[in-house]
Image (tube, rainbow, N blue to C red):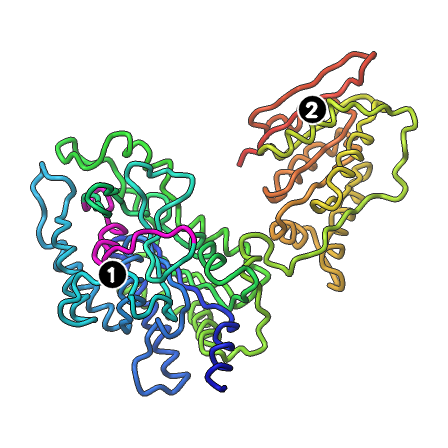
Amino acid sequence: MSVEVDQQKEKERPLRLLSLDGGGIRGLSELLILQEIMNRIKGKSKLDYEPRPCDYFDLVSGTSTGGLIALLLSRLKLTVPQATKAYLELAKYVFSEKKWFFQEGTFKSSKLKEAIQQQVELSLGQTTKNALMIDAQEPHPSCRAFVCAVAAHDYAAPTGPTLFRTYEVVKNKTLNCTIWEAGLATSAAPTFFKLIEIGESSAKIGYLDAGLGYNNPIELLIDEAQREFGRDRSLACIVSLGTGETDASYYERPDTFEKIVPVKLIKMLEKITTNAGAVAQRYERKFKDVPNTYFRLNKLGNVTQLTTGYLNEAKVSQEVDQLVDVLTGAQADQNYVKLGAVGGPLLPVLPIKWAFPENLPVNLNFVAREELDKAIRTHLSEESRICILQGMGGLGKTEMARNLAISKRGRCHVFWIDCRRQDEMISDFVAIGPMLVPGKATFDVAAVRTLLTLQDDWLIIIDNVDEEERLQYIRKFILSLPYQGQVLVTGRLTKTRGAVIGMVRYGLVWRSNHTKPAAYIITGLVLP
């Protein structure tokens, strides 16, 4: 009975996720950071053996270098010292012999294949060099991992990269290839190695390093965790390890003689290469109000010396200590978020709020114009973020805004801001805070912006932009709002349009004379 209870507790335990960036030989820094984490776990738990990362993480993702490390730590279940030794051997073995200028790729893929096969046999035993990613004896390991690669024929596929997994899944299965094939696929950076073909002889697919678009695989990790464990599973932590700033020369166009990749692909590289740091910053903002959950550790500069110095920094060292507490279960009172909330709001799912001014005057002469109402709703739902209604007083701008608010009721948060006075505008905006999170003592403008960042969808109506001196302030205010929401602005001044048109990329303008409402509708995307 106790075994069943333990198994049930294990299924309910908050998840610990590990994401490993790509970064060439600089991936050594990820192992150095992991070694420090394991050393502190060993000391804190008073262990007399070397702890393995596979005993402390439930799901590991990796791209390129990070993919190789993920295989070493999860599929081969190595300790960090063992993985570091293997990693250095791989690098030494692989990069020791360059190919001739007329051959595809700079280094021999055969060398990398041999190096991975040797490590597999060393870890799993003789005759295992062609061991598969999914172990038939353990199709659902306690520490699961996947590595990322992109199909060379469709490197910008909207469905994202291919995930080569060490565990069975019900949906979106991929080929259970060998460990060495997965290692080559995730490492096939076009300027280093030629692509690897995987599959049956009649249906082989060529794969390239997913660093071409997913150098920081944290978003893939979260999506996969939600599919594999369910959106209601609690999250203990996400650890994201980087290798420093991305070297732009990594994807520079090679010499003509090298013939490394098609010209079409080379032209696409700059468009689809993801800035791992930008992804990391986005998640730092997401988890700002959820402490001790997201840990981004990313050294800068030369690998060994500066990674050690980075870990010795007081702030970083404290963050590592907090992470160790989470991994060892020392933070029993931690408030966990649900996996399903990570892709959207990171606060508990909040009831939809509909804040409508009680004293809003009603224009009894207003006649609804279905075509206009439909145009507003359509353009705010199709990538556009801002809609501006500008015209003379009494034409029904506020009524059209009211109709939009009513149509959104129950579907997203709706907030109304009155701009007749600047202090009222600020107070209306700050009042959004206690509506979303009742009971919190104080809010300011910055705190409310953060709250809106954590919500999936919302509409803010900025009504009565009628004073010229406030136009620039309102423009800056709109630019500061998060991107996942929508904004409708109403105002009398013709300069309302001019004040905002500078931040509109494309637009649709509606005009009319006195027989029909004189209103402009401008929709578009806010420029950075």
Q: Tell which tag, 1 or 2, sits nearer the viewer.
A: 1
In this rendering, position of residue 525 left or right of residue 28: right
Residue 443 forms part of the magenta stretch: no
Q: Residue placed at 16% from the left, 55% from the top?
A: 112
* Depth check, front residue: 152 or 267: 152
Instruction: Give residue 197's position: percent from left, percent from top.
Output: 21, 45
Q: What element carries label 1?
A: loop
Which residue is tagged 1?
132
Assess disc 1: are there few (<14), some (14-19) or many (≥20) residues with their C-alpha within 10 Å of its C-alpha.
some
Which residue has dot 2 on it?
Answer: 521
Main SS category, magenta section: loop
Give the residue type at disc 2. Ile
Q: Where is residue 96 in the image (x, y as percent from the top left)?
A: 10, 55
Mark 1 and mark 2: Cα distance apart in space: 59 Å
Of residue 425 and residue 451, the one placed in the foreground of this image is 451
Label 2 element class: strand
Q: Give the range drawn in magenta.
A: 171-193
- State the image quarter where residue 125 is shown: bottom left
